[in-house]
Amino acid sequence: MATPTATSGLAPVNGIELGYQVFGAGAPLILLHGGFGSVEMFGPNVDALAAGRQVIGVDLQSHGRSPAVDRPMRFETMADDIAALIRHLGLDKADVMGFSLGGGVALRTAIQHPDVVDRLVLVSTPLRRSGWYPEMTAGMDSMGPEIAEPFKQTPMYEAYKQIAPRVNDWPVLVTQLTELLKLDYDWTDEARGLSASTLIVAGDADGLPPRHAVEFFELLGGGQRDANWDRSGMTQHRLAILPGVTHYDINVAPALATTVAGFLDER
């Protein structure tokens, strides 16, 4: 991954600090990682996306470079953080892209703060908690603070250890995140009113079935009719199902960056 620019750092927002890294130049794209991760979770896709725009990789509450805080972790408050960060950076609007946990935050940002979101990219992001496969929600339900120690044997902890301001705060992150993952949610009604042009991306072997991504696309008005030879039947929204991709590698799949860049360059 490329070296971030000198504008990277910690941003004070809503009483906490968010670590962020800036790559490339051009139209801004806020990039939000999945659970237990950081911007590094996207691997070479950061460089691929930054080839045509300014990528601002943000570490969410208590993740990565963002100092752990004593605040319940919620999609809604993290969305407020992202909107505040966009304003802190002096941006009128930004494209926002999130994967898994970050996708939920990106979606809530577009719902709660439509004024700061230009284009929206949701990768492996369900409309509701029941959108995940049952084995995924069962896995979330089984996790609690007690996994902090055994998870030190995982690549997620190894990455955290390299960049966290206080490595001993790992149990704080684990406790906050595992609590969040157990909470039920259903954003169907709110998502129906999304104003931002949205790209929904899922793998054909993802943690949510392709039919859920299609349902989401249809909720936004996509997939309702033939587009016609002049494309007059198309909506402003897009759907991509990436072949041979799982929930555990979609974030680094080269096809992800190619698909996202094409969508962002449409305007």
Image (spheres, grey):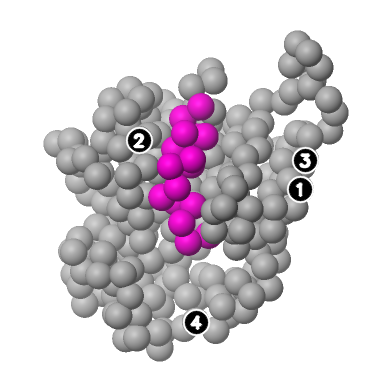
Give the number of the mark in front: 4 or 2. 2
Q: Is residue 213 visible?
A: yes
Q: Mark 1, residues whose alpha carbon is within 10 Å: few (<14), some, or many (≥20)?
A: some
Range of the magenta residues?
247-262
Residue 143 is labelled as 4
Residue drawn where x is 33% and y is 75% of the image: 154
**Element at badge 1?**
helix
- Marks 3 and 2, the one that precedes in the sequence: 2
**Residue that label 1 marks:** 215
**Amino acid, disc 2:** Ala
Residue under the image location 77 percent in, 42 percent down: 219
Q: What is the crowding at mark 4: few (fewer than 14 residues within 10 Å), some, or many (at least 20)? A: some
Local SS, label 4: loop
Q: Earlier in the sequence, mark 1 or mark 4?
A: 4
Q: Is residue 78 visible?
A: no
Which sits in the foreground, 142 or 210?
A: 210
Three-letter amino acid code at the position of disc 1: Glu
Q: Residue furthest left?
A: 6
Give the farthest residue toward the front.
244
- Which residue is disc 3 drawn over? 218
Residue 267 in percent (x, y) is at 53, 18
- Whether 200 is drawn above or below 163: the answer is above
Q: Is residue 254 left or right of residue 213?
A: left
Q: Give the mark, 2 or 1, whose residue is nearer the N terminus.
A: 2
Nearer to us: label 2 or label 1: 2
- Residue 5's mark? none
226 shown above or below 66: above
Dot placed on the residue nearer the N-terminal end, 4 or 3: 4
Disc 4 to disc 3, how far (Cα)?
A: 33 Å
* Label 2, label 1: how far apart the Cα atoms are: 29 Å
